[in-house]
């Protein structure tokens, strides 16, 4: 019986595609095609479009080079790719924090569609946008990474743990601390009004 075609993003075929790419490098193009736009969009929301072009390309170049180290027991390449992208974003920590703070100064004047708008969708009052953006910019880098992987990339705690190569409990703790700091920055308003955090499963 013939093997199923390589189409993604399918959680069960990512590992098999990557494994087959060890001997047939062109197969890795399936992973690129499935996830490039998503990773590019994530980086653009954290930094900007110009940086996203470079970092997204570098993410997949690094993933291709490291493909033999991919854990084939994992269900999806998605957290792995987000982890690589987040590590590359780390080189731009200062500019990212400055960008959030600048967005905070703009407050509600900024038009919809910027990367901070995804972060603030759960905030009850529109005027809180500026304070929230400043609060995100003031977070320690490790807490900001967890928060934005959860809110922008919609990863579960387990997927964030895979992406950052940290324990599940560390992700939960960082998310909780980030949430508390943002709540304080917003004068007691919970920035995650509709959830206690991502669920797994």
Image (cartoon, rainbow, N blue to C red):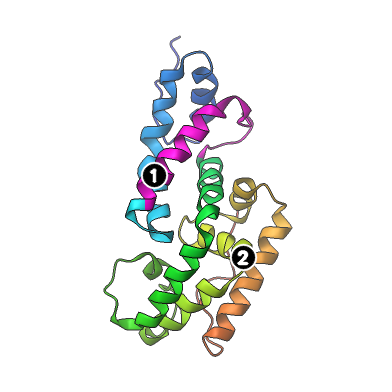
- Furthest residue toward bottom: 187
Q: Is residue 61 magenta?
A: yes
Q: Quadrant of residue 28?
A: top left
On screen, residue 168 above or below 33: below
Horizontal side of 89 relative to 74 (left or right) equals: left
Front position in the image: 37 or 168: 37
Q: Residue visible at 45% across and 39% down?
A: 58
Label number found at residue 143: 2
Taking the spot 70% from the left edge, 66% from the top edge, the residue there is 173
Residue at (63%, 46%) from the top-left corner?
A: 162
Q: Which residues are magenta?
A: 51-77
Q: Residue at x 38, y 75 (%)?
A: 103
> Around disc 2, counting alpha carbons within 10 Å, would you say few (fewer than 14), some (14 to 19), or many (20 or more)?
many
From this viewpoint, is residue 198 visible? no
Which image quarter holds the N terminus?
A: top left
The secondary element bearing badge 1 is classed as helix
Q: Secondary structure at mark 2?
A: helix
Residue 54: give its label: 1
Q: Is residue 194 above or below residue 90?
A: below
- Position of residue 41 measured from the top left corner of the image (x, y, whole percent): 37, 52
């Amino acid at each position: 019986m013939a093997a199923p075609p390589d189409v993604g993003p399918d959680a069960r075929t990512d590992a098999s595609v990557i494994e087959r790419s060890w001997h047939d490098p062109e197969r890795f193009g399936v992973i690129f095609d499935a996830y490039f736009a998503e990773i590019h969009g994530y980086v653009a929301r954290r930094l900007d479009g110009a940086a996203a072009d470079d970092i997204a390309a570098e993410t997949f170049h690094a993933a291709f080079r490291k493909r033999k180290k991919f854990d084939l027991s994992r269900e999806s390449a998605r957290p792995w790719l987000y982890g690589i992208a987040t590590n590359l974003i780390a080189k731009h920590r200062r500019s990212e924090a400055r960008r959030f703070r600048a967005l905070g100064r703009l407050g509600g004047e900024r038009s919809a569609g910027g990367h901070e708008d995804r972060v603030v969708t759960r905030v009850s009052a529109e005027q809180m946008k500026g304070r929230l953006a400043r609060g995100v910019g003031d977070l320690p880098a490790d807490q900001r990474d967890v928060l934005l992987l959860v809110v922008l990339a919609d990863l579960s705690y387990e997927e964030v743990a895979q992406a950052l190569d940290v324990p599940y409990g560390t992700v939960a703790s960082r998310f909780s601390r980030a949430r508390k700091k943002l709540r304080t920055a917003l004068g007691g308003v919970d920035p995650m009004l509709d959830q206690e955090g991502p669920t797994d499963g």
